[in-house]
Image (cartoon, rainbow, N blue to C red):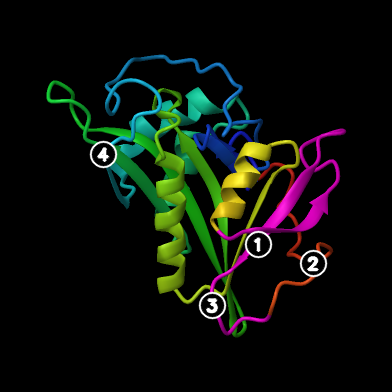
Amino acid sequence: MKRETSSRGCRFSSTVSCFTKQKHAANDEMSTLTPTRSQSRPHPSSGKGKRAELIVRAARVDDLPAILLIENSCFPPGIAFTARQVRRLLANPNAIPRVAEGTGSRETKISIAGWCVGLVRHAGRHVTGRIYTVAIDPDCQDRGVGKRLITDMLDELVVRDVHRVYLEVRADNTRAIALYEKLGFNIVRDLSGYYGDHVHGVSMRRIMLPTSPPLSSRAEGPPAAAPDGK
């Protein structure tokens, strides 16, 4: 991932909220960023810590306004995806964009609590995946939204015969790393200066199929994503 708040090598925003932008972002299981909103919208249930009633589904073009609100709340300018970038991800046949919808209260309309994108790469006989970005609405943190999105993404990657899944995250983002480890990821490579001067990252990997070879040393792993993560 590399956005790191969310991770963009992998961007990870939140608490799992703005988690993973592949090298883009900062520290959010995480969220240390103060969200800024240009408009208000309803959010699933009220009160942090409550588990929202969620439906994870494929992201659509009509989700664009909600996705952009989350992006701008989780990531600073230059790291937050633009409308053009989101549209490109939605149209990319090798991308798996997902949103988590929260049912909210009786008075509240259904709203988007977070979104994530996985990428699939075919290289010869091997199929690898990458958790490219995870961003959760700051108002929906600590409700299991990020974990639900990532779990759903991993299930989809299995269906697509992905053998290994990679992501990048800031080395000091211990909360996100702990979550990824619970979901079966292991650190395979240190990324010195990956998020800028003196801001280091790690590459993590999850073996998806029992027939895959065992994990090896931390020196392994695919080349890190480009610094801009876009």
Q: What percent of the width, then of the height, locates residue 121?
A: 57, 69
The residue range painted magenta reads 184-213
Location of residue 112 by image quarter? top left
Callout 1 environment at 10 Å: few (<14), some (14 to 19), or many (20+)? many
Residue 25 image position (x, y, % from top left): 65, 34
Q: x, y (%) of residue 61? A: 32, 44
Residue drawn at x 18%, y 27% is 109
Vertically, is 63 above or below 120?
above
Please report whichever mark, 2 or 3, sits nearer to the chain's N-terminal start.
3
Q: Which mark is residue 220?
A: 2
Which image quadrant for residue 66? top left
Q: Nearer the viewer, residue 78 or 37?
A: 37
Secondary structure found at label 4: loop
- Name the front one of labels 4 and 1: 4
Asked if residue 46 is positioned above or below residue 175 in the image, the reply reads above
Mark 4 vs mark 3, CA separation in Å: 30 Å
The answer to whether residue 148 is above or below residue 74 is below
Q: Looking at the picture, which amino acid does disc 4 mark? A: Glu
Q: Are marks 2 and 3 in contact (CB under 8 Å)?
A: no
Q: Is residue 96 visible?
A: no
Residue corresponding to mark 1: 205
Mark 3, residues whose alpha carbon is within 10 Å: few (<14), some, or many (≥20)?
A: few
Spot occupied by residue 177 in the image (x, y as percentages of width and height) = 65, 45
Give SS at disc 3. Answer: loop
